[in-house]
Amino acid sequence: VLSEAMAEKGGHVHGIDLSQPMIEAAKIHIQTQPFQVDYRCIRTSECVANHERYDMITCMEMLEHVADPSAILRDIASLLKPNGYAFLSTLNRGIKSYLGAIVAAEYLTNLVPKGTHRHAWFIKPMELVNMCEKAGLKVVALSGMDYHPLLKSANLSRRLGINYLLAVQKPLSSDINTTSAH
């Protein structure tokens, strides 16, 4: 959805995922659109190995689903051009996120399939900030995000208890040479 919205605004967009069925569904959907997205089933580490570089990377609602989010962030740092930006969103690890993202979203409203989330893999904001800094990325902004399922809308907020967004930038002087086993 985000990939197509950015392409519609004129961006040259690559959408990646490890799920081949998700990529195939996206490829089918994009055929009905007047713009293009290059959808690929590929790991971030493969993009690094291919020496790909980007002005901007979005990583939305994904980090809480991987065993080693630090590896993804190192890959993002390697993939960003100097002065490039990455926008990350994830779930905070706490009681509010457990109740909102697991109990409410998975069991009460069935917004996502049961078992989608592992609360232990949710990431506290300062943990994500530290991971980004260790990867050589500079934090630009941190904001909460309130999701309103009945209204099918979301808005930025100061509340970091459930969903939050982090904007980071790769400094000009950064010479990140990291490898990932991801």
Image (cartoon, rainbow, N blue to C red):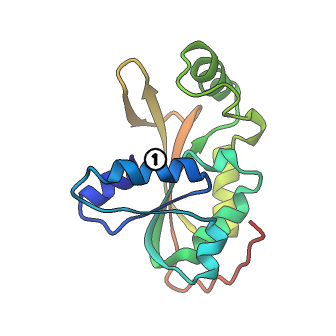
Q: Is residue 82 left or right of residue 32?
A: right
Camera-nearest residue between 155 and 35: 35
Q: Is residue 101 left or right of residue 172?
A: right
Q: Residue at (64%, 73%) from the top-left corner?
A: 46
Q: Residue 173 occupies which quadrant of the picture?
A: bottom right
Amino acid at circle 1 = Ala
Relative vertical location of residue 102 with respect to residue 136 in this rendering, above or below: above
Can you name the residue that lies furthest to the top here? 108
Question: Which residue is labeled 1 in the image?
Answer: 25
Q: Is residue 138 left or right of residue 63?
A: left
Q: Secondary structure at mark 1?
A: helix
Relative vertical location of residue 152 with respect to residue 160 in this rendering, above or below: above
Q: Residue at (39%, 46%) from the top-left corner?
A: 1
Report crowding for label 1: few under 14, some 14 to 19, many 20 or more residues within 10 A (C-alpha).
few
Camera-nearest residue between 161 and 152: 152
**Residue 96, horizontal then vertical, whole percent:** 63, 24
